Image (spheres, rainbow, N blue to C red):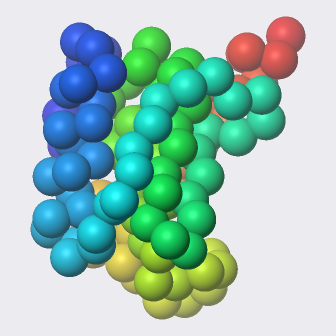
Amino acid sequence: MIKGKWEDKSEFKARVKEFAGKMDIEVKALAIRPMANKWASCSTDGNLNFNKELLDMDKEIGDYVIVHELLHFNVPNHGKLWKSLMTAYLGDYEMIEKKLNKEKRSLME
């Protein structure tokens, strides 16, 4: 797990590509843009979008959102398989999920 904030979009995109390579997932298009209600989204044709607000958050939160979204290419839900894969790639992902939810609440205030 990398600590600290992201330097820029290119560092974040490189991290997405790194995880995609480890997970054997082909990403056809990758964008970082403003998103009103989500941290990320993916489509069945290999397109990934990430909320640009992630660039201002800790890298471990970015890693969580990256892995979460990449897993949805093969696992469409948040069931047992998804949870076990999250643990395999990130360890205690639930702790990171709590941090992300805390960020979400602070942004809404």
Up-down relation of residue 37 to residue 79 (above or below): above
> In the rendered view, would you say 17 is above or below 21?
above
Please determine whether, in this image, residue 33 is positioned above or below residue 74.
above
Along the line of sight, the residue nearer the viewer: 23 or 84: 23
Instruction: State the residue at coordinates (39%, 37%).
Output: 62
Residue 83, visible in the rendered structure:
no
The spot of residue 28 in percent (x, y) is: 35, 59
- The residue at 64%/80% (across/down) is 77
Residue drawn at (73%, 15%) of the image: 107
The furthest residue to the right: 109
Give the position of the C terminus as an image quadrant.
top right
Place residue 100 in its image quadrant.
top right
Name the image quarter holding residue 88: bottom left
- x, y (%) of residue 87? 35, 70
**Looking at the picture, does residue 42 appear above or below residue 40?**
below
Q: Nearer the viewer, residue 69 or 43?
A: 43
**Quadrant of the rendered structure where residue 38 is?**
top right
- Of residues 73 and 92, the one drawn nearer to the viewer in this rendering: 73
Question: Residue 75, how many percent across, how many down?
Answer: 52, 83
Task: Determine whether, in the image, residue 2 is placed left or right of residue 81.
Answer: left
Q: Is residue 4 left or right of residue 33?
A: left
Seen at 28% across and 47% down, the residue is: 16
Q: Residue 69: x, y in percent?
A: 49, 59
